Image (tube, rainbow, N blue to C red):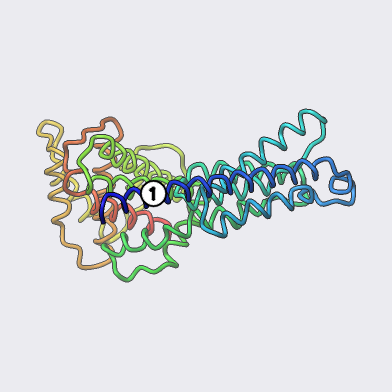
Amino acid sequence: MNEEMKNNLIATLRQLNHSLQITNDEIFATALRLLQEDLRNHQLSGLIAAPDDYATRANNIAFLFIKNHLASAAEILYQLLIDETIKHTGETNTQRHMGAFYANKGVACALQGNLDQAVVEFLRASEEDKLAYGSAKERSFALVTLLPEYFVSPLQKEILVLAQHINPNLTVADIERLIRFLGSRSYAFIAYIKTYHTHHEALQVSDNLFSKLQILSSFRNLCALLEIELKIKASTTEGELLAIITQLYKNETWWKAFIHAKDLIKGTRKVPRSVNDELRDSFSVLAPDEDTMFWKSLLIGYITRNHTIHQMDTTTHLVTHYSQQIMAHLMYAMIKVAL
């Protein structure tokens, strides 16, 4: 391609980009104009009107961006519609239900991978539903359907693949059981896994301190969730992790093997061992059966928890050598505890 052709192509692309921008602006302006008309239409806000009737036309336009894989534009437009509705509410002292706007903005955020913001928008939609429907609708569509669909389901397969590194016989049903056991904590669980995957991938691209710290934070948070799981199962809110594990599993046939391995691997207070040595030796434990797989995963979770709860050392093998194995064992331990 000669220089003239290259310049012509660049000019054409710039024109196209400008045209698309104008098109988006025109669509945004049309949606806002329709919303303003419908906010003032008393037939769409009277006693016989559904709470979302006023939003139908503007919402349909905004949702076209989602259907056409333009989630970022959809997010911008939904925020404009929300702002306009809030402005109208303040000027007229009339309440308008914005559940659909918040819910679909959440979908747009989720499609862009911004799961944290998606959860915020789904929760806002839920609060709007409470105001609009009261006790007749205890849980909103955003929480019942959209949150699991866009937040939980996409990562279930990744969780399963991780845990199958420990036990290939696990199925999606095992992941679904864990999600049910965690209840509302499952969204934090998914967020921690998403953070881990994002920054594990980032480290493959470039070695950086931020990603290492994020991975350590994910481990610490997942270990905290594992401890909560165990305490729920033990019907207690008190006690250190090892004490809870002892309470729950001291009568199991594998208990003596677990304690023996822990004592060998952890060393003594007088002669402490490094986390690198502890992890290396714990990963070397052979696990020919499901019982051993479980207590080995518990042991690795216990070691990881002890070395992330009070420190964030990014030079250890927690991050540099064993992060994928640690994540797999944490997933497996949590799945088994939920059984």
Residue 1 sits in which quadrant?
bottom left
Q: Nearer the viewer, residue 289 or 276?
A: 276
Pick out the residue farthest to the front: 4
**Where, quadrant-wise, is the C terminus in this rendering?**
bottom left
Q: Nearer the viewer, residue 63 or 187?
A: 63
The residue at 32%/63% (across/down) is: 161
Q: Position of residue 100 (x, y in %)?
A: 68, 49
Q: Is residue 176 left or right of residue 214?
A: right
The residue at 73%/52% (across/down) is: 57
Pick out the residue farthest to the left: 271
Residue 334 sits in which quadrant?
bottom left
| Mark 1 residue element | helix
| Above or below, 169 relative to 98 | below
The residue at 24%/35% (across/down) is: 209
Q: Residues within 10 Å of mark 1 (few under 14, many from 20)?
A: some
| Above or below, 120 relative to 233 | above
Q: Residue tagged by mark 1?
A: 194
| Above or below, 152 relative to 134 | below
Give the amino acid type for the residue marked by disc 1 in the picture. Lys
Q: Position of residue 244 (x, y in %)?
A: 36, 44
Q: Is residue 105 left or right of residue 255?
A: right
Q: Nearer the viewer, residue 133 or 43?
A: 43
Pick out the residue farthest to the top: 91
Q: Is residue 185 left or right of residue 219?
A: right
